[in-house]
Amino acid sequence: MTSRPARTSHRPARSSTVGRRALLLPVAVASALALAACGSGPVADTDDAAADPDAAATATTGAGHGFVEGADELQEPQLRLVALADGALTAFDPATEQSVTLAEGVDATRLGTDGRYVLASTDDGAVTLVDGGAWTVPHGDHSHYYLADPRVVAEPGEIDGGDGAGEARIASSASLTAVAFDGSGTGVVLDGEALADGELDERARVEGLGAEGVLVPLGGLLVASTATGAAGEDVADAVRVLTADGDEVDGALASCPDLRGAAATRVGVVVGCSDGALLVTEGDDGSSAAVERVPYPAGTAPADVATAFEQRPGRPDLAAVAGARGAWLLDARARALTLIETPQPLLRATAVGDSDDTVVGVDASGRVVVLSPDGLVAQTEPLLAGDLVDGVLPEGVRLEVDASRSYVASPSTGRVHEIDHADAARVARSFALPASLLVETGR
C-alpha cells in the first residue's frame, strides 16, 4: 500500500469528439416521476419494461440515489454498445441507432466494463479509462438510471500497473473502483466519488494478486486474490478481504485452488475456483465479511469446471461454459451450481439475471442459444460461423445481455446482432457496427 496522492483532475472541454448526451437521448421530457416513485415507497424494478428499444426516455434532475451533479435521472436504463474499431472508441445507442466518438487513437487488446466505466487495455499495461455517461444504480426492489456526458477520465500512463503490468480488468461498487493488472499482480483502488467527478483519487495499491489479478470492490471493502504458493510462483490460489485502504480484514481468507475470475453480484462477490466458487458477502457493519464455498455437484470432472463466470453487472445469477457439456448456472441467492447440458459444446455463456434462470450462449457452430435449467430453449442460425478460428471465437467476441436482448459482434461481417432471447432467439436487428471489441454499458 502507498500513501494517498492528491486528486488529479481530468475534465476535458466539451467538444464534438465527445458529443452531447442529447444526441443519444430519444426523448427528453422533464418529469418528476422517477424521484416521486422512489420517495413514495417501493416500486417494481423496471428493467424488463425498459428493454424495449423503442421506449422513450423521460429525464429529470435532482439528488436521487446515485445521482451526480450534471446527470439526468431517467425512467429506464440508457444502454450503450461501446465498440473499438480502428483505434476509435464509440458509443452506439440501440434505441436511436446513433453513435458518438468517446476517444480516438486507442490501442487495446481487451475491453472491459463495470456497467458505467469502460477500460481499454493493452497487453503491456497501457490503459484508457472512459466514463460512458450512462449507469444504473440498484436501490432495493427498483433501480435508478442516469445519463451524463461521456468523457475520458484517464489516458495511458495515468493509471500505473507497475512493471510487466499486462492487460487490466475493472470492477466497481458504489464507493470504489478497482483496476487489476494480470501481469504484475498489482491493483489500483480509486475513490468512486472522485471518479464520478472525472478525477483520479488513488486510495491504495494492492500487490501480490497473482496471475489472475482479481480485485473486486464489495461495498467499502475489496475482495482480492493472493499468491500463496512457493516464492517465485505466478499463481493465485486464495482469496482475502481488504479494507478500502488495502489493510487485511481479520478472518476473511479462504483457499481457492486454480482461481479463475470473479464477478460482483447483488448478493456478494463470486470468485471461481477449481472446486467450486467462493461467495464473499459484506457484514452488516460494513467492515467485516463472510466467505462461503459453493461446491460443484459430486462427480464433476476437472475438464468441466468453469473457466470464467459472466453475467449482467450486479445481478444475482452467473453462467460459465462447462467444458464440452454445456453451461453452469450459479445462483448466488440459492448458493447453488446447476449444470445445463447442451447438444453442442458452448464457446460463451452468460446469465440474464433477476427474475428467471435464463442463460444465453454461443455454441461451437456459431449459433446464439437460449437455455433454461432444463436445457436448450431456442437458437439462431450460425450467425458467427465466419468468426470462428479453428472452432474458437476470438477473445474480443463477447456476448452482452440485458433484460430481454442480447448483443454479439461479428467482426468478420462488421455487424452487431441484436437477439431477442425472450422471443425464441429471434434476431431483432443487425447493425452495421464494426467492432473488434465490444461491451455494453448503462446496465
Image (spheres, rainbow, N blue to C red):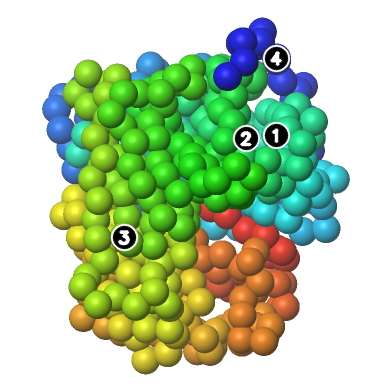
Q: CA distance from mark 3 to mark 2?
A: 25 Å
Whether residue 299 appears in this view of the structure is yes
Residue drawn at 41 percent across, 67 percent down: 306
Seen from the viewer's position, the closer of residues 74 and 179 is 179
* In this rendering, position of residue 162 left or right of residue 23: right
Q: Which residue is mark 3?
A: 276
Residue type indicated by callout 4: Thr
Residue 253 x/y as whole percent? 34, 36
Q: Are marks 1 and 4 in contact (CB under 8 Å)?
A: no
Q: Earlier in the sequence, mark 4 or mark 2?
A: 4
Q: Are marks 1 and 2 in contact (CB under 8 Å)?
A: yes
Viewer-nearest of discs 4 and 2: 2
Residue type indicated by callout 3: Gly
* In this rendering, position of residue 213 left or right of residue 376: right
Residue type indicated by callout 2: Thr
Element assignment for label 3: strand
Rendered position, 172 above or below 317: above
